[in-house]
Image (cartoon, rainbow, N blue to C red):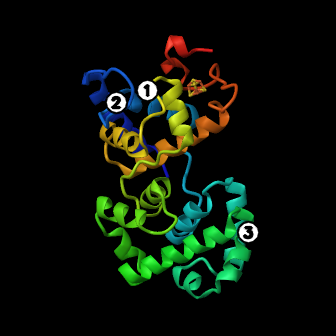
Amino acid sequence: MSASRILPSAARFRNRSRRAPRPAGALRSASPHPELALYFDAMFKAYGPQLWWPGRTRFEIIVGAILTQNTSWSNVERAIRSLRREKLLSAAAIEKVPFDRLAALIRSSGYFRQKARKLKAFVDFLRGQYQGSLDHLFATPTSVLREQLLAVHGIGPETADSILLYAGRHPAFVVDAYTRRILERHHLADGRESYDQIRRSFESSLPADPQLFNEYHALIVHTGKHHCRKRQPNCAACPLEPFLPNEAKP
Ligand code: SF4
């Protein structure tokens, strides 16, 4: 992925944001928030492209999005390596493999029986609704597919949006704990917002560009891991420090 496709998106928005009025208060509604484009620019300038998602195929990305629930990515990588070694990284193969064998192969990702059930549920859905075709799946309009994914066992909003964005290249913004933490520390949210309120606020503040959303979420994760830690955030070295309200500075 090159920065050349990302940067014009941010620049487009940056120009728009200069004209837009700054809304007061937190993200209690899904109203646009012009500062969010400036946050992207600052993080992108500091870190550059993040090259997400680290998956070789769309199906592997979907598997990763399900397995990464409540665990670290290194644990997911071990599980995916096991599935690859056994040639199970396809919907047809996951359909056929016995449940207990699948669960054993993904043990490293934690909650492995639950996650095996979720993988089976996803491939059942794909077969039942789309004849097993990811092309057909991702040809569905974003809002329709999002609702369908949310109805599949074990797929919540963050997983659904990760699948839509990273596997399907749909313009769905992924909200995670780092997103909430950064917004709350910058007084752009107060912890009472629903997942969808935060998602819609990003989506209404930025151009509907999947590559921009891809980079944005990856940059938030990078910032969260390296600076905006749960305890003792390292604001001094963080690219978002200029946006930190004075009263929030450590
Ligand atoms: S400036 Fe501080 S509070 Fe803001 S994102 Fe960076 S580390 Fe977190």
Amino acid at dot 1:
Leu
In the image, which disc is placed on residue 107?
3
Which residue of the protein is positioned furthest toward the front in this rendering? Answer: 192
Q: Secondary structure at mark 3?
A: helix
Does residue 156 sit above or below 247 in this rendering?
A: below
Residue named by callout 2: 33
Which residue of the protein is positioned furthest toward the top in this rendering? Answer: 246
Residue 8, visible in the rendered structure: no
Closest to the observer: 46 or 135? Answer: 135
Q: Counting residues from the N terminus, which is met first, the one under dot 3 or under dot 1?
A: 3
Residue at (56% x, 63% y) in the render: 66
Residue at (53% x, 31% y) in the render: 182
Residue at (42% x, 28% y) in the render: 38
Q: Position of residue 99 (x, y in %)?
A: 64, 82
Dividing the image into four equal quarters, which quarter contains ligand 1? top right
Does residue 115 sit above or below 222 in this rendering?
A: below
Amino acid at dot 3:
Arg
Q: Secondary structure at mark 2?
A: loop
Q: Residues within 10 Å of mark 3 (few under 14, many from 20)?
A: some
Q: Quadrant of the C terminus?
A: top right
In the image, which disc is placed on residue 125?
none
Q: CA distance from mark 2 to mark 1?
A: 9 Å
Q: Counting residues from the N terminus, which is met first, the one under dot 2 or under dot 3?
A: 2
Residue named by callout 1: 188
